[in-house]
Amino acid sequence: MRKALIMITITVAVLYSCTHDRVVPYKTSSGPIAKGDTVCFQSDVLPLFQTYCASTGCHDGKNNGEDRILNLTTYSNIMQGIVPFNTGPSRYYSVIQDGSMPPGNSPKLTPAQTATIAKWIDQGALNTSCATATCDTTKTTYSNGVSQIFSTYCNGCHGVAPGSGNVILSDYASAKSAGTSLKASFLAGINYTSALPAMNMPPSGPLSSCQVKQITKWINNGCPQ
Ligand code: HEC
């Protein structure tokens, strides 16, 4: 009976989703595309999985005691739990949406970030990459520019106390404290010039040069709010 109910629910969900217009983004084989209303996998979605799901000791491709070792750092691996155009059976979306992942006290994705993943799935879950048109080197305060970068690229590890390396970037006071007291190593880290490779941030690969400029200005200006 329960199985039948689940089947009916899935069937209704599938039928329902088919009545909706599908927004198909531009294909990517010809290289970067203009941003428009398309969710870009490479700049909007992948960093969320890398930051919130693939942090050290979690779904990083090593055996961390999971039933199945997951490595949520690449498009092809992420697609093993995503069904294009259909958030319902997309397991790597539903566990985020229902709050079960990231687990426990780990930093959760924000509703806006969760909605971005849903929209990307609704658009066909393609491996899109876009010109980083949203980056603006003049946006160099915490509330306008910097906190948005932290939220996408850093807060999966630096969002909840004590934070990796005891660094919290998800609220202004803590971020300012890190930006002032760790100024030199913070700058080296985001520029990927740390003497210790493990200190280069974010660990999955450098930010765009525009994003590095925004954070650099913010730190050099004394971390304005
Ligand atoms: C996948 C997890 C992860 C992500 C994402 C991440 N960090 Fe880190 N971060 C760490 C860990 C782990 C350490 C501690 C490294 C150590 O002590 O060896 C650290 C340390 C730091 C430090 C302290 C450096 C010092 O000198 O003590 C800063 C600053 C920092 N991160 C900034 C950032 C910024 C900015 C971002 C986003 C652009 C970011 N991190 C993204 C895991 C992460």
Image: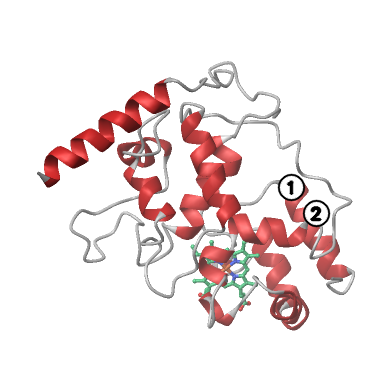
Vertical position of residue 70 compared to residue 18: above or below: below
Q: Residue at x 36, y 62 (%)?
A: 100
Of residue 155 and residue 87, the one placed in the foreground of this image is 87
Report the quarter where the N terminus lies.
top left
Q: Which mark is residue 96?
A: none
Q: Residue at x 52, y 75 (%)?
A: 164
Q: Is mark 2 within 8 Å of ligand 1?
A: no
Of residue 122 and residue 220, the one placed in the foreground of this image is 122
Q: Which mark is residue 209?
A: 1
**Residue 32, position as x, y percentages in the image:** 64, 25
Which residue type does callout 1 highlight?
Ser
**Residue 19, position as x, y percentages in the image:** 44, 20
Q: Is residue 191 visible?
A: no
Q: How is the image coloured?
A: secondary structure
Vertical position of residue 158 compared to residue 132: above or below: below
Vertical position of residue 81 compared to residue 127: above or below: below
Of residue 122 and residue 181, the one placed in the foreground of this image is 122
Which residue type does callout 2 highlight?
Lys
Say what secondary structure mark 2 lies in: helix
Report the quarter where the C terminus lies.
bottom right
**Residue 94, position as x, y percentages in the image:** 37, 48
Q: Residue at x 57, y 22 (%)?
A: 25
- Dot 2 surroundings within 10 Å: few (below 14), some, or many (20 or more)? many
Contact (Cβ within 8 Å) of mark 1 with mark 2: yes
**Residue 30, position as x, y percentages in the image:** 59, 16
